[in-house]
Image (cartoon, rainbow, N blue to C red):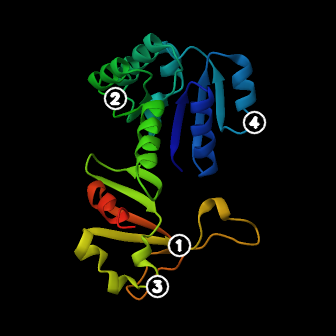
Amino acid sequence: MKKFAVIGLGNFGLNIAKSLVENNCEVLGIDTDRNTVEKAKGFLTHAITGNPASRTVLDSVGINEYDAVILSIGQAMVSSILIALYLKETGAKKIIARAISDDHEKILAKLGVDTVIFPEKDMAARIGKMLSMNNAVDYLPLTEEYSIMEVVPPASFIGKNLRELSIGARYRCQILGIKNIPDDQVTEDNPQKTIIAPSADETILQGNILIVLGKTKSIERMERLG
């Protein structure tokens, strides 16, 4: 079982902690607010009240024994930077930290934080990209060039199978999956079905959603066909 420590149990940290527990991980939560910690004790493996900007607190919980530490201090940028420094000095195996500004992001990276998350910035970029495209349903950037997108198939795709469409050769994209209906139309009586790694004989039907991997520009070119 993997072990994680979440420092800062605000909305962001608490939701990450819950997700980790739901995925069968052991989670330690640390926060300075006693009421927040008491609420978290109901679902976390361990939760303690303490000041994580203290070497003593970090040493007392054996922070270097955890697979990763998620640093999710809200608006307290100075505390976040100090804790990141202490985590590096105490030998934390992996540090994932939330940034609240561009400068904060740069400082955390300079300190050697393994992964810096900027939720507001990342989500804004994701939504902006998705809204700017004609038929994109969802968008997940992988690198600066590549992404995974859920797109409504162009009208010219309907009724044809993947072999006929030759999407890989024509657009240099790969179809990872096909959803039978959009997420907003899913009900108990009309459940979502997703075909993962569809065969070349799979036919694209009206109402399908394609899960596509490829260069973002290539996917955009494909979804603009109409």
Query: Which structural element holds mark 1?
Result: loop
N-terminal of the pair, mark 1 or mark 4, is 4
N-terminal of the pair, mark 1 or mark 3, is 3
Task: Categorize mark 3 by other alpha carbons within 10 Å: few (<14), some (14-19), many (20+).
Answer: few
Quadrant location, the C terminus: bottom left
CB atoms of marks 2 and 1 within 8 Å: no
Name the front one of labels 2 and 3. 3
Q: Amino acid at mark 2?
A: Val
Which image quarter: residue 117?
A: top left
Q: Amino acid at mark 4?
A: Gly
Q: Position of residue 183 (x, y in %)?
A: 61, 61
CA gap between label 1 and label 4 equals: 41 Å
Name the front one of labels 2 and 4. 2
CA gap between label 2 and label 1 equals: 41 Å
CA gap between label 4 and label 3 equals: 51 Å
Task: Categorize mark 1 by other alpha carbons within 10 Å: few (<14), some (14-19), many (20+).
Answer: some
Q: Amino acid at mark 1?
A: Asn
Name the front one of labels 1 and 4. 1
CA gap between label 1 and label 3 equals: 11 Å
Which image quarter: residue 97?
A: top left
Q: Write down the residue under mark 2.
A: 113
Q: Which mark is residue 208?
A: 1
N-terminal of the pair, mark 2 or mark 4, is 4
Q: Position of residue 114 (x, y in %)?
A: 33, 34
Q: Write down the residue under mark 4.
A: 42
147 or 35: which is nearer to us?
Answer: 147
Q: Position of residue 152 (x, y in %)?
A: 47, 65
- Judged left or right of residue 174, residue 18 is right
Q: Write down the residue under mark 3.
A: 159
